[in-house]
Amino acid sequence: MSHEHVSNTKRIWFVFALLSVVTTVEVFLGILKPDFLYMNTFLSMNFLNWIFYILTIFKAYYIVWAFMHMEGEKSSLRWAVVMPVIFLVLYLLFILLVEGNYIFEVFKNATIKWNF
Amino acid sequence: MNTTVTTSSEGKTWDGGNEPMGASYGKLMMWFFIVSDALTFSGFLAAYGFSRFKFIETWPLADEVFTHFPFLHGVSAPMYYVALMTFILIFSSVTMVLAVDAGHHLQKSKVAFYMFLTIIGGFIFVGSQAWEWKNFIKGEYGAVETKGGSLLQFVNDKGERVSIESFAANLPEERERLDRSKGRWFMEGAALPTYSVAEVQAGFKAHPEILVRTEVIYKDNAEDKKDTKVNHELTKQKQKTILTRAESENRLANASLVVEGANLTRNEYGSKLFADFFFFITGFHGFHVFSGVIINIIIFLNVIVGTYEKRRSYEMVEKVGLYWHFVDLVWVFVFTVFYLV
């Protein structure tokens, strides 16, 4: 193994606390759904959803970097794993969500009723 | 370090034993597997997003669907249960990483103990998911499907959901399920719901306070406000639309099926695809958790019998650890996409 074998139990518990706090915040926001976040949108998504997605990425970062110990790997491995996933996921989401939205418009403006 | 024999290969780049990217063969392959599996899950979640965008105005609201908590019957507790499941999975990730950490110091009993906790956590999570599925399949209120394929749910005059059971009439009618013995070998009808459409319609007539709630999400804009078919007092912004009594009667006259709970064809929560995606994505994730538990058990037994002690390397624990954390990682996204947004 390439990395140092120092015990990092302290960091593990710190990350656990962090992930727990973030999850708790998410759950509370999900239950309360504060109107000023839920009703106002930014770039056609409401603020609450923005917060959820940002916190999700935040949690994912800590799971991969701390738990899967990506921070201890060589940067070549780091980027070989992370870059393709990020690029392909963004690409996939872009294609599918734009297309989904387009089909929604087609259904909505169609002369044929599909759901009544 | 892929075999029990450790070869010294310093400086000999082409002699075998070289480790590209500074990771052993097994670890590198585990990472590549994780990349491909991550893309598989991304494909599923993106497909979910596609269908959700396609039916954005009629998609079910998660906090109305997942409201159960053990021992709290009839209490609407959105999110609490799934939050608990998330904590269980995060905690089992922590015990896994503690096992990996202990493995670096060749502390056999500590590795075994933490792996045992991880396995227990995994089983609790799979069990919780089974309970969640049970509630989802069983349903709570029931709904009616119209001839046009849309779904009608029922609320009282305060806008609270009511179950079909609470108002449906009991008509003296005979209903019979079509099965092979009554037709041809290929003829088989769906299981009969508790009430027939006629019973729901008769019960609806007898209870003037009951209103129909459609799948459509109310937007509170000028166009929606003008709609005379909508009960504007009960309907709130970004909630499902509640109809006036007159329009409720019209819509219910068009009913064709009573829907109770969920299956792969239709569900009482709304869009038909919703249940399909729920079953498929949480099911595929649950399958990953389950296989992770099995792999953990195998490695746990190996730890117990001292395989890695003899090898002087606990790298296998690290490799299954990667897989286990990946399962946790996927759950973080499933949790957000299905339960939060």
Image: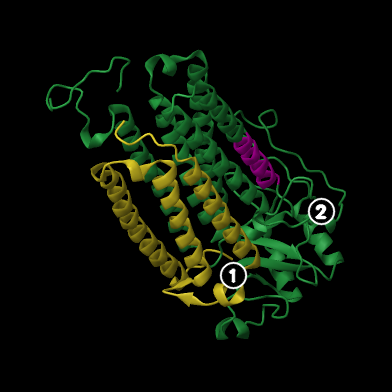
Q: Which residues are magenta?
A: B124-138
Which residue bears the numbered disc 1? B217
Q: x%, y% of residue B308?
A: 42, 18
| Amino acid on which disc 2 is placed | Glu
Is disc 1 on the same chain as disc 2?
A: yes
Q: Please state the chain letter of the residue tagged with numbered disc 1 in the rendered image.
A: B
Q: Colour of chain A?
A: yellow
Q: Nearer the viewer, residue B282 or A110?
A: B282
**Residue A61: which disc?**
none
Figure chain in green: B
Q: x%, y% of residue B123?
A: 61, 32
Residue shown at the point (66%, 75%) measured from the top left:
B236
Decide: few, some or many residues near mark 1? Use Cα within 10 Å; few <14, some 14-19, many ≥20: many
| Amino acid on which disc 1 is placed | Ile
Q: Is residue B247 above or below residue A30?
A: below
Residue shown at the point (51%, 62%) measured from the top left:
A52
Q: Nearer the viewer, residue B50 or A103?
A: B50
Helix or strand or loop: what does disc 2 sit on?
helix
Q: Is residue B154 above or below residue B225?
A: above
Which residue bears the numbered disc 2? B165
Q: Is residue B86 left or right of residue A107?
A: right
Helix or strand or loop: what does disc 1 sit on?
strand
Q: x%, y% of residue A112?
A: 48, 68
In the rendered image, residue B257 lying in the magenta stretch gets the answer no
Q: Is residue B264 left or right of residue A101?
A: right
